[in-house]
Image: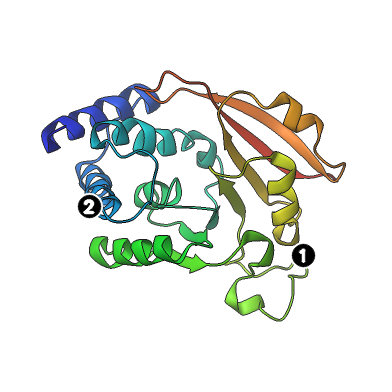
Amino acid sequence: MAESGRAEELLAGYRVMLGEELVAERCELLLAYLDLLVHWNRSYNLTAVRDPAQMVSRHLLDSLAVLPWLEAQTPAHLLDAGTGAGLPGVPLAIMRPGMHVTLLDSAGKKIRFLRHVKRELGLDNISPVQDRLEEFLPPELSSGPPDFPSAPPDFPSAIISRAFSELAQFAAAARHLLGPDTKLLAMKGRRPDAEMARLPAWIRVDRVEKLSPPGLHEERHLVIMSLTA
């Protein structure tokens, strides 16, 4: 798909999905990120979606579908766990420049790509970090876990993932980062009722939202979780 075609698909899809116009500057940055992903994907296995014609819907619009659930209280610091090629973290960082996004992945080649994205696009609000979620702590807290509720303001206030397999595994890996107000956002395909039934007692499902990214003919859901009282 030509550049103009991708732009039209992104603009139209965003309008249908969110009921507003996508600012031109944000559209250009999103498509520039997509161009970098297409280029690097020729040499590195960054994403299983290799057809550029599918990437607007399967990557950009799919990532941006969670924006309405970041609106009520935009987290000051979003942690994207298992970010891979930067999804959904990079598109969300582009759309919310006042929000800091840590892009966490254990694969060195993906972190190298994301550092290149940061330089090329001038995204000062992203921090690519090579680490595993269960071992990650922000540098300021490397001596140990935070003392909630007095965690520093740059500590993740929301943790999102598009790649974890089981909800229980996601919650367990993130447990040391969870404060009383921290939200876990799990992007899933079909509504994961069986997975929700296997969650431990210390985590609760606040709600499950159905997502409808234009151009995707597959089920999409967002599971929003937090610590039990």
Residue 39 - label: 2
| Location of residue 153 (image quadrant) | bottom right
Question: Element under label 2?
Answer: helix
Look at the numbered discs 2 and 1 and tell me whether their residues touch, using CB distance below 8 Å: no
* Quadrant (top left/top right/bottom left/bottom right) for the N terminus: top left
Residue 148 - label: 1
User: How many numbered circles does the render carry?
Assistant: 2
Residue at 24% over, 42% down: 27
Q: Position of residue 148 (x, y in %)?
A: 77, 64
Asked if residue 110 lies left or right of residue 56, the reply is right
Mark 1 belongs to which amino acid?
Answer: Phe
Q: Within 10 Å of the Cα at label 1, are there few (<14), some (14-19), or many (20+) other Cα atoms? A: few
Q: Position of residue 119 (x, y in %)?
A: 28, 68
Residue at 39% over, 45% down: 47
| Location of residue 149 (image quadrant) | bottom right
Q: Earlier in the sequence, mark 2 or mark 1?
A: 2
Tell which tag, 2 or 1, sits nearer the viewer: 2
Mark 2 belongs to which amino acid?
Answer: His
